[in-house]
């Protein structure tokens, strides 16, 4: 046992140690029986000095630890939080939530917030094909990629992530429609391979990139779009 | 720095090893306190054990307003009171006043079992060991143990670096550990004979 660690036990007893060191000492006490025994003895001398030691062989810890072994304080936490609220408190909170929601809806016209219908109108102006997901799935089929997720990044571009089964890696595909100004799509591309292709009659610009796939593989995948053009 | 708070946080995060460290730290003190109340050594052990288990199960309720020992002491005394009440229900009337009177008693009575007498002997040996420590170590250790000063306060009182305080206290405890282990060994030999 190192002298430094022994001294750390003395510091732990007096509450003069950092949280990080406390964790380290806890692990050390648990792992090293000699160290544990020293911790126990140190506390026993302290109790003896204060006249609070009745039996120097007393050790309740094995029984206590076996009793608490199947109990997790974290699991009980969630239940206990709710158990602090009685039935009337919960009902009261529910009523408050309903009232807040009701008054919020009533105040919408006063706040002059954009209505849901105007949002729908603006989304109709989107020139992206309605079946974006179908297009992305179709593009992924060129390299057997399965679509993980996608998002629409602007009115004429979107971004999708694929899983490439053969390589067990991820691939990001940025899709730009033909009407997007050149400086705009060039501004969003900073790596990977970019190709001009077509889906049916729609001209597309595709940018393929990946954190894990090598460029050689990206070029090979991008060629599949050119072959199927 | 508050190591006890760190230990409690570890326990709250599900680290049972940290709880064992607390049990080892406070078990003797707690058994002694419950014994003072109940005057029954075996029962005091059972109550202290139950209190430790209860405290673990309710550790989320411990907010740290008091020390862990104060908190678990309250749990133990309430457990002891409940025990006495249930016992009273089955035999005699045991009112709160009698229980409070028991709680206020501090001296260990003549009902001491043999191991308690041994503990008295050990205490005497430990006090002798403290008296025979080198002056600087004895003063530093006494300021910590009996006056409850922090290391920083001791360093100010003794006009020395905090590192010196640390090493003096550790050295003192190291010497006391030798006395303690020697007592344990001789006691073990006597019991074997």
Image: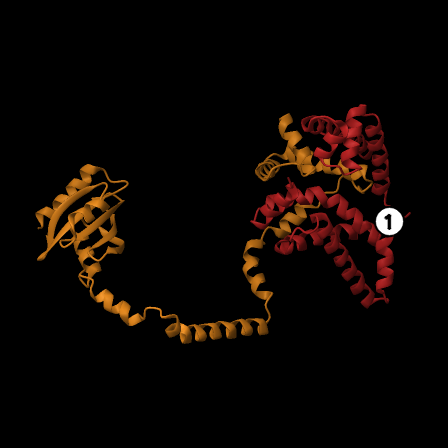
Chain colours: A orange, B red
Given the current orientation, which residue lies at the most extreme right position? B110
Q: Identify the image quadrant of residue A112.
A: bottom left
Where residue B44 appears, as percent x and y from the top left, is: 78, 51
Residue at coordinates 80% horizontally, 42% vertically from top-left? A52
Residue A72 in view of the camera: no
- The residue nearer to you, when weighing B190 against B91, is B91
Where residue B112 appears, as percent x and y from the top left, is: 87, 46
Q: Chain of mark 1?
A: B
Where residue B168 appears, as percent x and y from the top left, is: 73, 26
Describe residue A214's horizontal placement relative to residue B135 as left or right: left
Residue at coordinates 86% horizontally, 34% vertically from top-left? B124
- The residue nearer to you, when weighing A188 against A26, is A188
Q: Which residue is mark 1?
A: B106
The residue tagged with tag 1: helix, strand or loop? loop
Describe residue B54's horizontal placement relative to residue A210 as left or right: right
Q: Identify the image quadrant of residue A117.
A: bottom left
Describe residue A10's horizontal placement relative to residue B34 as left or right: left
Residue at coordinates 71% horizontally, 52% vertically from top-left? B71
Q: Quadrant of the N terminus of chain A?
A: top right
Residue at coordinates 23% horizontally, 54% vertically from top-left? A158
- The residue nearer to you, when weighing A38 against A217, is A217
Residue A66 in view of the camera: yes
Q: Judge the density around disc 1: few (<14), some (14-19), many (≥20) Cα neighbours within 10 Å.
A: few
């Amino acid at each position: 046992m190192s002298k430094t660690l022994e001294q750390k036990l003395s510091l732990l007893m007096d509450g003069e140690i950092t949280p990080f060191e406390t964790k380290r000492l806890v692990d050390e006490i648990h792992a090293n029986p000699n160290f544990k025994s020293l911790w126990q003895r140190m506390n026993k001398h302290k109790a003896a000095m204060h006249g609070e030691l009745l039996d120097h062989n007393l050790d309740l810890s094995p029984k206590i630890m076996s009793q608490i072994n199947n109990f997790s304080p974290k699991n009980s936490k969630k239940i206990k939080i709710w158990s602090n609220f009685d039935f009337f408190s919960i009902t009261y909170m529910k009523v408050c939530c309903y009232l807040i929601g009701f008054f919020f809806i009533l105040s919408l016209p006063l706040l002059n917030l954009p209505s849901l219908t105007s949002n729908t109108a603006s989304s109709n102006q989107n020139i992206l094909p309605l079946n974006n997901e179908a297009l992305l799935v179709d593009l992924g089929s060129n390299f057997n990629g399965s679509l993980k997720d996608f998002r629409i990044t602007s009115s004429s571009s979107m971004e999708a992530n694929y899983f490439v089964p053969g390589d067990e890696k991820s691939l990001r595909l940025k899709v730009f429609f033909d009407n997007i100004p050149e400086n705009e799509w060039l501004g969003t591309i900073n790596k990977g391979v970019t190709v001009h292709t077509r889906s049916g009659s729609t001209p597309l610009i595709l940018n393929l990139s990946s954190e894990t796939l090598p460029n050689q593989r990206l070029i090979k995948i991008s060629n599949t779009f050119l072959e199927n053009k | 720095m508050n190591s006890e708070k760190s230990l409690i946080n570890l326990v709250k995060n599900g680290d049972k090893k940290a709880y064992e460290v607390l049990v080892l730290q406070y078990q003797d003190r707690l058994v002694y306190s419950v014994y003072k109340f109940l005057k029954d050594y075996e029962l005091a052990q059972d109550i202290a054990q139950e209190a430790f288990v209860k405290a673990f199960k309710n550790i989320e309720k411990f907010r740290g307003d008091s020390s862990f020992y104060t908190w678990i002491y309250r749990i133990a005394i309430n457990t002891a009171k409940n025990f006495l009440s249930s016992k009273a229900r089955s035999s005699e009337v045991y009112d709160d006043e009698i229980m409070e009177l028991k709680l206020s008693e501090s001296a260990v009575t003549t009902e001491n079992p043999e191991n308690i007498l041994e503990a008295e002997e050990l205490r005497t040996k430990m006090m002798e060991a403290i008296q025979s420590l080198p002056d600087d170590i004895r003063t530093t250790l006494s300021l910590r143990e009996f006056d409850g000063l922090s290391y920083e306060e001791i360093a100010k009182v003794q006009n020395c670096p905090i590192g010196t305080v640390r090493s003096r206290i550790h050295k003192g405890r190291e010497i006391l550990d030798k006395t303690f282990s020697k007592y344990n060994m001789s006691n073990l030999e006597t019991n074997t004979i």
